[in-house]
Amino acid sequence: MEQFVIEVKNVSKSFKGIPILNDINITCRSGKIYGIIGYNGSGKTVLFKCICGFLHVDSGEISVNGRVMGKEMDMLEHAGIIIEEPGYIRNLSGYRNLEYLYRITHKKDPAVIHSIMLKVGLDPQSRKKVCHYSLGMRQRLAIAQATMEDQAILILDEPMNGLDKEGVAEMRKFFLEQKERGNLILLASHNKDDIELLCDEVYEMNHGILAMYSKST
């Protein structure tokens, strides 16, 4: 598998003159999980959106394997992304939603969708419409969507949101399996246990400044 490296170099971003990201630097490599903690509004989601190409930086540079975002690559490639809740077709089942998205890339193997739904704890045979899903079920569906094409990079903003204790344990195991497959995972979480149990390196975002964070020993 190709080794992916994300490099964020001296990145700053403001909205209406208000600094959101201030000279951010971080390097992420395949086969590791990187955690970012911080209060709501600290800049975590904005950083993720810049890495994905959803927002352009004001200064600095973001590159993936040497290709610069916004210049040599418009959107992050080979990536599964959870940033805010995906826009599902709410009157279709979870399976039908994934099938529709899967076929956009001209892929038609239904076994892949069955497999990933089972791995995240959803029933691929269920006809239950997404509009009747609980928050936790929608979150599991989002994780399935982000990982169903075996993407090499996973950008996950609060992926445990809405999951019960059992669901959190299942998804932690699933993310560690993704790491073992050599995937690069960038994870934002309010849950200290997620950070302690999953992440190889942890950073804290505070008023737009990113700094290394020491995990408990």
Image: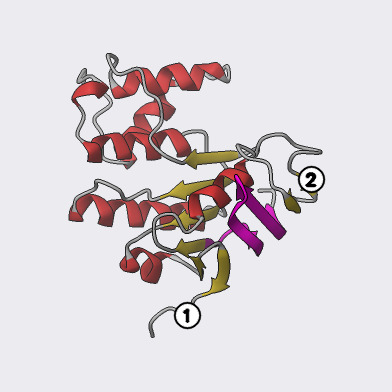
Q: SS at mark 2?
A: strand
Q: Do the residues bearing badges 2 and 1 touch, measured as CB atoms within 8 Å?
A: no
Identify the element where label 1 is drawn.
Answer: loop
Q: Which mark, by number, is residue 98?
A: none
**Would you say 5 lies left or right of 66 here?**
left
> Which residues lie in the magenta part?
4-33
Residue 75, x across and y down, in percent: 66, 35
Label 1 neighbour load within 10 Å: few <14, some 14-19, many 20+: few
Residue at screen point 33% across, 41% down: 119
User: What residue is pinned by disc 2?
Assistant: 67
Q: Is residue 139 above or below residue 166?
A: above
Q: Nearer the viewer, residue 110 or 96?
A: 96
Rendered view: 127 above or below 216? above
Q: Position of residue 32 (x, y in %)?
A: 55, 62
User: Looking at this view, is 202 or 199 the one in front?
Assistant: 202
Residue topped by disc 1 = 214
Outermost residue, top direction? 91
Most extreme residue toward the bottom, as rendered?
Answer: 217
Answer yes or no: is residue 24 visible: yes
- The main secondary structure of the magenta stretch is strand
Amino acid type, mark 2 = Arg
Residue appearing at x 69%, y 49% in the figure: 2
Residue 8 drawn in magenta: yes
Please state which amino acid type lies under the numbered disc 1. Answer: Ser
Horizontal relation, residue 148 to residue 61: left or right? left
